[in-house]
Image (cartoon, coloured by chain):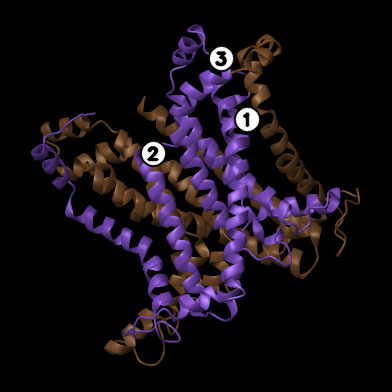
Chain colours: A brown, B purple
Amino acid sequence: MSNDHLLASPLHKLGKTGRAWLLATPGIVYFLIFFAVPLAGLFLISFDKPTAGVVEVQWMFRLDNFVRFFTRSLYYEAAIRSAGLAALVSAITLFLGYPLAYVIAKTLNPGRNTLLMILVLCAMQLDMVIRLFGLMVLMGDNGLINEFLRWTGFIGETPLPLMYNFFGVVVGLVQFSLPFMVLSLVGVIQGINPSLEEAARSLGARRWQTFWKITIPMSMPGILAGMLLVFAISFSSYVVPTLMGGWKVVVLPIHIYQQIAELGKWQFGATVAVVMFAISLLSMLVYQRAAAKASGGRA
Amino acid sequence: MATNPTPARRKRREAAVPLVIRSLAGLTLLILLAPMVIVILAGLNSGDHLSFPPEGLSFRWIIAFLNSDIFLPAYGFSLVVALITMVFSTILGTTISIFLVRTRFVGREFMRAFFMSPLMLPGIVLGLALYLFYISSGIGLIRTIPGLIVGHILVTCPYVIGTVSAALVGFDTSLEEAARSLGAGRLQTFRKITLPVIAPGIVAGSVFSFIVSFGQFDVSLFLTPPNSTPLPMALYISLRYTFEPTAAAAGIFAIFLVVVSMLITAKLTNLKRLANVNFS
């Protein structure tokens, strides 16, 4: 390259590490300005004096907002509901996702393997609102399932309540987060040396014994990573609880939106956001603890 | 890894997956794909809404979408936002991954967690933080297109960092040193040696960031400009109030976009590698 020698001399002095720092400077600056600073601002505002309609920092810090959050059942129950919902969804997706991940990992035919991976990736990448359209057509009071049951005579005029309730939100969140679970597991299951399973079998273990005693424990890192990811994304979702819950299943993201967009209570909205942030962070710490324990147990 | 199993051996191993597991896997696949299939049927159905038993097929809602002054502009707007987002997050994400993989310093793990955290942070929290930042800093990004793209870049960058780092980790740097010692310039070495190796990671990362931005809802909630609605937002409004099949027709075009993107990714990269990408 003609201009390479011009750049070479000052860059050379920087050394390899220095050049990597230089290369990443735009990215680092971008994340500092548009990620670190806004989050710090969010924290600051969450401790500020609650004044409806005022967005600017008033520099009057107090704990009022957090006291309000943890003393009103409306809010702390929403936090418990959000976390419980996310934990339930991550258990269900593990149960449903593991078999598919296992099948994909054990499919050695490259064409079929790629096809399955493409199907899972498409399901993951498709806009959730579009997938919710499909789910709502399927599960609504006059949806396909209820119409089918009516047509066959299993139910009368009153529809099965599949949507606009807790059940609907769980189904929506499971559909939303399943692909993430499957993808977290496929790589780990593929990485298990097949000779381990064969050895267990040849030593007389039954197929199920091999599965429970070898395959499942060996895929623990993937199980934990998948459960954390599913917890985080179903805990964060705003669209699924609003559309599938019909505003009856109130989770933290709904409170944030209401406080900000409908009530103009900026400081308290920021407080709810900070609580969400803290719970996400906490779940990550729990995950790291569990992951360290899982890998330590095996070594 | 058994490199080349004979057909008989492969058959025996695949058959070894128990029936219970295979049927559960089938159920999961059904849950994953059913909504997509229903959207396609609803967009192609001839009645006023999709019912059981179905009425018949027609292009009436596809034509309605192509003439719609809500969904078609929303589709176009999301497409433009996703393309701009993709360019920026590919460049930023790739440089950040090279930095994260090639340097050794205390706190590098923390830096990686920092750059990956938009993925774990609730989208609505990130959107609110940016919204508050735009208002209090007065930098003129409140509910503007650039302000929206700034948020999209943050949530899509981790995908590029994840895929490019995975491609870089297995890369043998002695190849670069060899090229350099044979007289290749720094840029030449990058173009001829490094880039071809990490290209699949970059492609996968940029396709991911395109699609994630195209379908982004939570982050956009507080950042969307008043006169331009992204497609997910337009669909959300339709699902809450009117529920017209035109939305399903718009969905068909979005599904088409996703399937094509994934086929391109599958063609250019090894999808198995994607399963090994560490996104946390």
The answer to whether residue A146 is visible is yes
The amino acid type of the residue labelled 1 equals Met
Q: Position of residue B224 (x, y in %)?
A: 70, 61
Q: Is residue A186 left or right of residue B279?
A: left
* Disc 2 target residue: B269
Which quadrant would the N terminus of chain A be assigned to in this image? top right
The amino acid type of the residue labelled 2 equals Thr
The amino acid type of the residue labelled 3 equals Gly
Query: Which residue is found at the position 34% from the left and 48% from the top?
Result: A117
Q: Tag 3's secondary structure?
A: loop
Q: Nearer the viewer, residue B173 or B257?
A: B257
Residue B195, compared with residue A51, is above or below; it is above
Residue mark closest to the camera, 1 vs 2: 2
Q: Position of residue A257 (x, y in %)?
A: 69, 64
Q: Nearer the viewer, residue A198 or B153?
A: B153
* Disc 1 target residue: B111
* Disc 3 target residue: B185
Residue A114 numbered mark, or none: none
Which quadrant would the C terminus of chain A be assigned to in this image? top left
Query: Which residue is found at the position 80% from the left and 63% from the top?
Result: A265
Residue mark closest to the camera, 3 vs 1: 3
* Distance between the alpha carbons at the discs numbered 1 and 2: 27 Å
